[in-house]
Each structure stands twice: as structure tokens, then as C-alpha cells.
Image (spheres, rainbow, N blue to C red):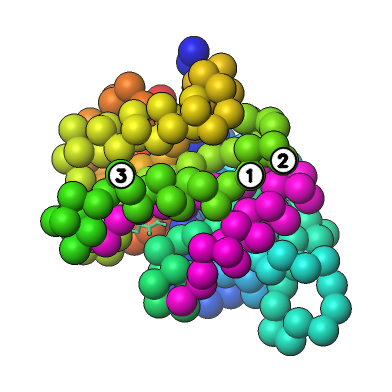
Amino acid sequence: MTRVKFVAGNWKMNTNKAQAVELAKAVVAGAKAISGVQIGCAVPFVYVDAVGQVLNDTNVMLGAQDAYFEKNGAFTGEISVEMLKDLGAKFCLTGHSERRHVIKETPELVGKKADAIYSAGLTLVHCVGEKLEERDANKTLAVVEAQMKELQPAKLTDPSRLVIAYEPVWAIGTGRTATDAQAQEVHAFIRDLMGKMWNADFASKVRIQYGGSMKPDNAKGLMSQKDIDGGLIGGAALKADSFLKIVEAGK
Ligand code: 13P
């Protein structure tokens, strides 16, 4: 089973509007020459529209970092999946560790958001990963399994629109990357688990990204692992040249 690698930038709460547009233009310019890898940028809500206009009709997919699960109504401050679709978004994250641990989203809320994003027709990038104390207590696989079970196999039927991002929390923004073997071990576990939650064929088609201090110099090693099908890139995605080098490493 050959899975097309998917490398996506997660810009988090960074850039102003002009910087977002400039970064998007530079990514588009560099991405033109790249084929065989799917490329995306998950941008701050307020710049989805402006960046979307730059990414329109290019090989760089527009994404968002979060979405609320209700379609519309009295949910002050929230953004629906429909609104993101209206602006051209093609994928959306759920369960990012910063939303779980800084914003304090519950597993129940993450699950509802995942369902809403997939059901609306977008590609869902569901993030999972353990904290350092959980790894030290040998709880990595149990934590990841619980986060995977926020998903509803009966509803998620198209493997091409499901992406799992394994992001060990201790590797995010710390410069400390999981070794190739540490990452591969958890990716293999996730694929095996999906085989049980869905079936082996479905599991073989879902891309599993690695995230956590992925940089141009460690991207190739990570993405050469059997079950690592791309990356979700934070810091290194804020500069087009380092992001594009990581994309190249996915070829
Ligand atoms: P860094 O690449 O900055 O470690 O961030 C990873 C991440 O959280 C992507 O979602």
C-alpha cells in the first residue's frame, strides 16, 4: 500500500495578515515544482480567507486549526465547519495538544469536533500524543488509544479523509524530537489499533503524520519509517524555505 505523504504546516497563533499572505505566496511558489507529496497549511481563523485566495487553484491545501461542532447559532466567538468550507478550507485539525492541555478541551468536545469536521466533507487531521510524564509512566500507548477512541469508526468511512497526527507533547516546540524508532513504534501501534477499530484495509490507507520539532534535518529519517506518512510542522512551517525542505524530504 503506497500512501501519498501529507506534510502540513500548523501556523498556530502566528503571523499578521501581511505575513500570512507573504508566507502563503512563498509556499505556493516553491510547491509548484513539487509533486508526489500532498501539502497543506493550517492557518489562523482570521487569515483563512486571505490565505485561501492565495492557495486557490494551487497544490497547497487550505486548512484550519480548529472548528466548533455546531453548524450555526448562539455560540459566541466560535467558528463552524460550514464557515471554514465557505472560505475554501479543505482540512481541519482536532485535538491538538495545545487545545487539549492549554485550552482544556475535553475528549468529548474533541470527539464532537472530529465528527463535525469529517461529516461536513473536510479532511480530518486528528491529533494524538502523550505528555512527558505519561511517557515516563509507560502510559504512551494507553493515552494514544484513548484519544483514538474519540473517533467514531461507523461514521468515518473514507480513509482518504482521515489523517492522524502523532505529536508527543514533549517534542512540540521543544527542539526535542522523538527518535525515528520511538515515533515508528507509536505509528505502528496506531495503525494496528485502526485495524481493530475499522479493518486492516482501512488502516492501511490512513496517513499518520508525525509532529513535534520536525525540521529539515530530521524529516527524511522520520518520514522514511514504514508507518510515518508525513508531518505536521509548527515552528519550521513559519519560514517557507524550511517548510519546503521538509516537504521535499517527503518525496
Ligand atoms: P513544532 O514543529 O513547533 O514542534 O510544533 C509541532 C506541532 O505542534 C504541529 O502541530
Residue kind at label 3, given as amino acid type: Leu
Describe the element under mark 2 as helix, strand or loop. loop
Question: Is ligand 1 within 8 Å of the beta carbon of the residue shown at mark 1?
Answer: no
Residue 174 among magenta residues: no
Structural distance between the alpha carbons of marks 3 and 1: 19 Å
Q: Is residue 114 magenta?
A: yes
Residue range in magenta is: 104-132
Judging from the image, what secondary structure is the residue with disc 1 in? loop
Q: Which mark is residue 152?
A: 1
Q: Is residue 233 left or right of residue 154?
A: left
Q: CA distance from mark 3 to mark 2?
A: 24 Å
Residue farthest along the right direction in this orientation: 73
User: Looking at the picture, does residue 63 appear above or below residue 101?
Assistant: above
Residue drawn at x 58%, y 47% is: 151
Residue 56 screen position, x and y as percent: 72, 48
Q: Residue at x 85, y 78 (%)?
A: 73
Q: Looking at the image, in which quadrant does ligand 1 appear?
A: bottom left
Determine which quarter of the picture holds residue 221: top left
Residue at the image position 41 percent from the left and 27 percent from the top:
192
**Mark 3 vs 2: CB contact within 8 A:** no
Amino acid carrying label 1: it is Gln
How many C-alpha atoms fall within 10 Å of the one at disc 2: few (<14), some, or many (≥20)?
Answer: few
Residue 161 in percent (x, y) is at 65, 37
Residue assigned mark 2: 155
The residue at 77%/68% (across/down) is: 70
How many marks on residues? Answer: 3
Residue identified by numbered label 3 = 141
Calculate the distance from the C-alpha at mark 1 to the C-alpha at mark 2.
6 Å
Q: Nearer the viewer, residue 234 or 157?
A: 157
Q: Amino acid at mark 2?
A: Lys
